[in-house]
Amino acid sequence: MKNPKYKLLKKGLLFDAIGMITMAIPVVGPFLDIIWAPIAAKQMSKMYKGEAGKIASAVVFIEEILPMSDLIPTFTLMWLYTFVYKGVKMPVPQTIEVEANE
């Protein structure tokens, strides 16, 4: 089974890519950022709980709503902060075998 922290990284990379793609669309891109900013903030708060998640959620909202700041990979930076800098360990699911008594 895959490590859950790498699933978070994959989701973060996807969300960062979506945020960057909106910048590449002329004229319509800034309006898409208005839609994407609250969605990104909600996803960040779902992915990272606690005070750090709340702060990251506010940061990603501001980053997405401001023009020309979409190049900042906020989700990836939060993953690096959580799992590399802070060294948070996520439990890896394990299978427990149980013998049936007859």
Image (cartoon, rainbow, N blue to C red):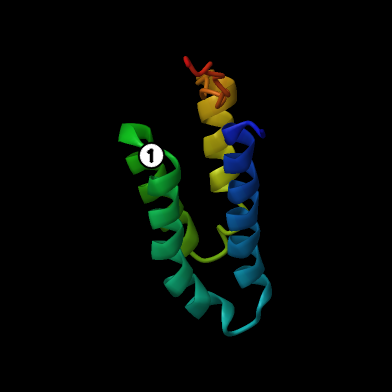
Q: Position of residue 38 (x, y in %)?
A: 39, 63
In front of the other: 38 or 24: 38
Q: Can you say whether 31 is above or below 96 in the image?
A: below
Q: Can you say whether 21 is above or below 89 in the image?
A: below
Label total for image: 1
- Secondary structure of residue under mark 1: helix
Q: Tell me the residue at 42%/39% (across/down).
A: 48
In front of the other: 96 or 78: 96
Mark 1 neighbour class, 10 Å CA radius: few under 14, some 14 to 19, many 20 or more: many
Q: Tell me the residue at 54%/20% (across/down).
A: 96
Q: Position of residue 62 (x, y in %)?
A: 41, 56
Q: Is residue 10 left or right of residue 53?
A: right
Q: Is residue 42 left or right of residue 17?
A: left
In front of the other: 4 or 99: 99
Q: Position of residue 9 (x, y in %)?
A: 62, 41
Q: Tell me the residue at 54%/18% (across/down).
A: 87
Q: Is residue 64 left or right of residue 58?
A: right
- Amino acid at the residue labelled 1: Gly
In front of the other: 98 or 31: 98
Residue with the most extreme bottom position: 27
Q: Which residue is mark 1?
A: 53
Q: Can you say whether 89 is above or below 28 in the image?
A: above
Q: Position of residue 81 (x, y in %)?
A: 53, 29
Quarter of the figure with the N terminus: top right
Q: Tell me the residue at 36%/37% (across/down).
A: 49
Q: Is residue 34 left or right of residue 15?
A: left
